[in-house]
């Protein structure tokens, strides 16, 4: 739903991430794997290196993932499991590095802004500090491309996005890819260059009961549903995979959005100005008091994209 990108200079960010690893040792392990599995080496890019796997952009990772999984698709399940296990044991073991990866993403010096799940914007996944001063991580370091299916991307910086447990769980995404082809996959990750769900998909309230009155929708919520105005069809795949329509039409979320829509429709700009005149404040001050745009943006409230868009703000 939102692009996950660091505000840090990309060169400095990649350098900092590479510093988390013994790159030379990992490269030797990769070289051995390529020697042991020459057919996989042939299927992959000739210039595959540990550095590219660790800090290559998501388009590159999608290419590696596609080539690796295509090769394994020609193997029996038993053969595939043995090969993937060999790559995990051969150096690409996420479990050995997951703690430092999470700390790297949480470190404010690395420029990542983690507030809500980037897939659904329904859950706050911010880290909080316990009374003893230790931090508790609420987000899951979700692999956009599954590490179990393709261990080569298990440690890749641009394969990580902060998600909620619901989106990352087996009932929603699990081991699935976002998109079916390499091209779709390369475009639909929040870490991908050019990803623009925010700009290409807008929330709207849709009437499902013909003739339903447009006032006080919370009193007859079944006449409406939260829907999407999709400008670029490829993003329908994200909506479907993460069950966004069903989740935003869950009673609590739906009623909250309809409440704000009703409030805005009952208080157009001329009414806001009347209240401002009565309270002797500016229009902007009154508008903020009523609709909390700055507050909710500043504090990164969940569902804020949906709330603004159903209010047509």
Image (spheres, rainbow, N blue to C red):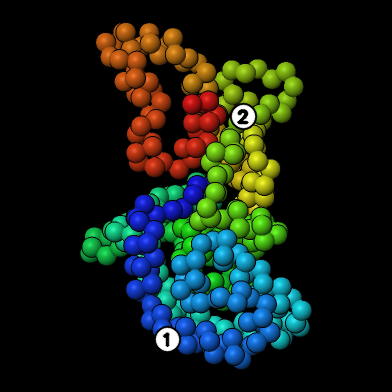
Where residue 102 appears, as percent x and y from the top left, is: 39, 66
Residue 114 falls left or right of residue 239: left
Residue 203 falls left or right of residue 296: right
Of the two numbered discs 1 and 2 in the rendering, the one whose residue sits closer to the viewer: 1
Where residue 119 appears, as percent x and y from the top left, is: 54, 51
Q: Residue at x 65, y 37 (%)?
A: 230
- Judge whether residue 164 can be spotted in this image: no
Residue closest to the eye, 187 or 45? 45
* Nearer-N-terminus badge (1/2): 1
Q: Secondary structure at mark 2?
A: strand
Q: Residue at x 58, y 35 (%)?
A: 202
Against 63, residue 164 (above or below) is above
Question: Residue pushed farthest front?
Answer: 46
Label 2 belongs to which residue?
Answer: 205
Q: Residue at x 49, y 37 (%)?
A: 305
Q: Number of labelled discs?
A: 2
Against 170, residue 90 (above or below) is below
User: Which numbered tag is attached to residue 25?
Assistant: 1
Question: Residue pushed farthest left?
Answer: 132
User: Which numbered tag is attached to residue 143?
Assistant: none
Where residue 73 appears, as percent x and y from the top left, is: 74, 76
Q: Secondary structure at mark 1?
A: helix
- Asked if labels 2 and 1 touch by Cβ distance under 8 angstroms, the answer is no
Q: Residues within 10 Å of mark 1 (few under 14, many from 20)?
A: few
Query: Residue 151 is drawn in which quadrant?
Result: bottom right
Residue closest to the eye, 163 or 113? 113
Label 1 to label 2: alpha-carbon separation = 55 Å
């Amino acid at each position: 739903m939102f692009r996950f990108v660091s505000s840090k200079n990309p060169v400095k960010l990649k350098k900092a991430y590479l510093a988390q690893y013994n790159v030379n040792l990992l490269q030797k392990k990769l070289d051995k794997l390529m020697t042991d599995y020459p057919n996989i080496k042939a299927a992959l890019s000739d210039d595959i290196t540990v550095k590219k796997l660790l800090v290559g952009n998501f388009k590159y990772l999608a290419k590696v993932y596609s080539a690796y999984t295509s090769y394994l698709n020609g193997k029996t399940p038993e053969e595939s499991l043995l090969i993937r296990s060999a790559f995990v044991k051969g150096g690409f073991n996420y479990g050995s590095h997951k703690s430092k990866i999470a700390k790297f993403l949480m470190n404010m010096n690395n420029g990542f802004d983690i507030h809500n799940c980037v897939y659904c914007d329904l859950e706050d996944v911010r880290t909080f500090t316990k009374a003893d001063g230790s931090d508790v991580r609420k987000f899951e370091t979700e692999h956009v491309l599954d590490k179990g299916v393709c261990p080569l991307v298990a440690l890749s910086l641009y394969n990580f996005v902060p998600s909620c447990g619901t989106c990352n769980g087996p009932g929603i995404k699990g081991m699935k890819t976002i998109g079916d082809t390499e091209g779709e996959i390369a475009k639909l990750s929040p870490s991908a260059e050019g990803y623009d769900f925010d700009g290409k998909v807008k929330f709207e309230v849709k009437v499902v009961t013909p003739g339903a009155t447009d006032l006080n929708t919370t009193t007859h919520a079944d006449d409406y549903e939260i829907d999407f105005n999709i400008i670029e069809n490829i993003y329908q795949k994200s909506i479907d995979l993460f069950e966004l329509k069903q989740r935003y039409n869950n009673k609590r979320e739906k009623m909250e959005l309809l409440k704000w829509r009703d409030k805005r429709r009952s208080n157009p700009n001329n009414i806001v100005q009347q209240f401002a005149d009565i309270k002797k404040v500016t229009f902007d001050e009154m508008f903020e008091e009523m609709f909390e745009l700055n507050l909710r943006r500043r504090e990164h409230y969940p569902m804020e994209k949906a709330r603004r868009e159903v209010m047509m703000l």
